Amino acid sequence: MPRATLNIFISYGRADGRELALRLRDDLQRIGHNVWLDLDEIPGGADWSQRIEDAIEHCDVTLALMSRASFDSQWCRAEQLRALRKGKRVIPLRLQATAEIPLALEHLNYLDFSEAARYDAMLRDLLSDLSAGSAFAPQVDSAATSDSPFATRSGRDRSPGRTADEKRDAAAFRRVLHDLRTDPRLGARSWWPYFLFLYVDIHTLGGVLAADQMTARDQHGPTSGDRWAHFVRLHFRPRPPQRYHTEGFRPVDGAQPAQAESIPVCLLFDLEALLLNPEARISAGDPARTGKTARTAAFFKQLPFDQIYHDGWFSADERDEILAYRDAQVLLPDATGLEALQFIWLRSPAEYETLRELLPAELWQRWRDKVTARADHSVFYHHRIYVQQADLHAEHARLRFNQPQRDYDCGPFWLQARADLDDGSSLSWSHEDAQITDDLQLELPGNAQPYNLQVTLNGALAYAGRYENTWALR
């Protein structure tokens, strides 16, 4: 099976959502998922509401088809609310450009299925979102049992097939991916084969999100004569070797790498979607060193994933080989759209707040559901100073820093902070020789008015956030 099987509940308004609901059901079942509709699954005499409740209870994902009819339907609203209350993943699909969005779904990004001509492209986006969600679930056989509301009732062919915008050997790629994703040796890394990883600086990210694409220039700066600088290059694994040297703040007397990223952001893309792009090339390491890339499933199958995904101790004589393979990549010429983007990952809650302050409100609203600072999976090196937590109050602002592994990375830093109060006044702090070994507390007037706080290390942004007197706003 090319993808983890999901139980999917489709909530829709019968008056104007039936046609799309049926089409989605058939396509999702063809891919291999179990899909439930209140169309023909309920036997005569069964309690209608109880069967719907059972279906939502057993589903992994609820697709909420947002249309004029579903907005007016109390049943659709009840299904959406129950799915949210049960902690189910809800993906809204907008059927008409003029359809209102229910209040309960306002905070969620939706997929736009309002143009029939774009159905195939939007289905691909939906499949990408579904695979991302399943990457963090336990990898078990989730075939429905006979007494489940998702039990298969037909013998239809559920093979994945191939779409026109995929490589000719897409099926062979999927077989390799399936073997990777079910390899018990990966253990806690079992989610890695669902994604490609790309790192950018937080200041670059705003332009990428606004443009809806990642370009080679965004990643590498002005392109040079190096042919590989004209490709967007994504890694098969988090924390590729060069990240160790480019990530984080260094003391003022330390050497700064050319592409240092004070606040790095990791973009996680759907591996399958990008890998099957006909233009995608594969490298068994840094292509500037290997000098070789390929597009075929045969080449992909031969990659030494035991070394690419290696994440533990290695001996001195293994070092060069393992580090070289950890640099394995997928390359796309010039630019790639963000349709396959699954997560925008920050190192800490403080850097999450910083991104929220940097992005225009419209961009934040559009992308916020993909932004995370979760700490249960390691996608960064955490060996240098950065702001881990910021607690802003009327009387003071307290910053907690990630403490580096080595004492000499604690400083000295040129630390500056500035609080701009809503009454037009401001406060500033500066320390040209700061050793950061503990929390930093900045004293404020305590008059309970809102303020914006910005902190820099060596002139580079380390934190930006805003304090709001929420009690006064009530």
Image (spheres, helix red, strand yellow):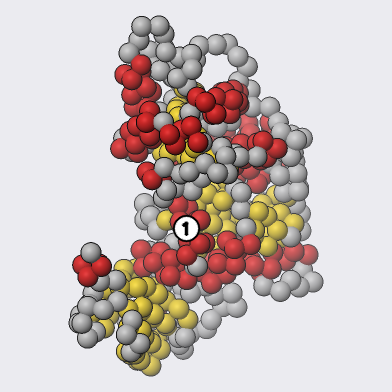
Residue topped by disc 1: 365
Residue 39 position, x and y percent, is 48, 17
Q: Please tell me whether mark 1 sits on a helix, a strand or a loop.
A: helix
Q: Where 130 sits versus 142, above or below?
A: below
Residue 53 position, x and y percent, is 33, 24
Tell me which corner region of the image, top left, top right, bottom left or bottom right, holds residue 351.
bottom left
Viewed as shown, does residue 263 lie left or right of 272? Answer: left
Q: Where 206 sits versus 165, above or below?
A: below
State the residue in front, 8 or 365. 365
State the residue in front, 282 or 144. 144
State the residue in front, 314 or 447. 447
Residue 104 position, x and y percent, is 37, 43
Residue at (75% x, 44% y) in the render:
278
Viewed as shown, does residue 12 lie left or right of 124? Answer: left
Residue at (55% x, 47% y) in the render:
195
Q: Can residue 355 be seen in this view?
A: yes
Residue at (73% x, 50% y) in the render:
281
Residue at (63% x, 31% y) in the render:
175
Tell me which corner region of the image, top left, top right, bottom left or bottom right, holds residue 77.
top left
State the residue in front, 137 or 125. 125
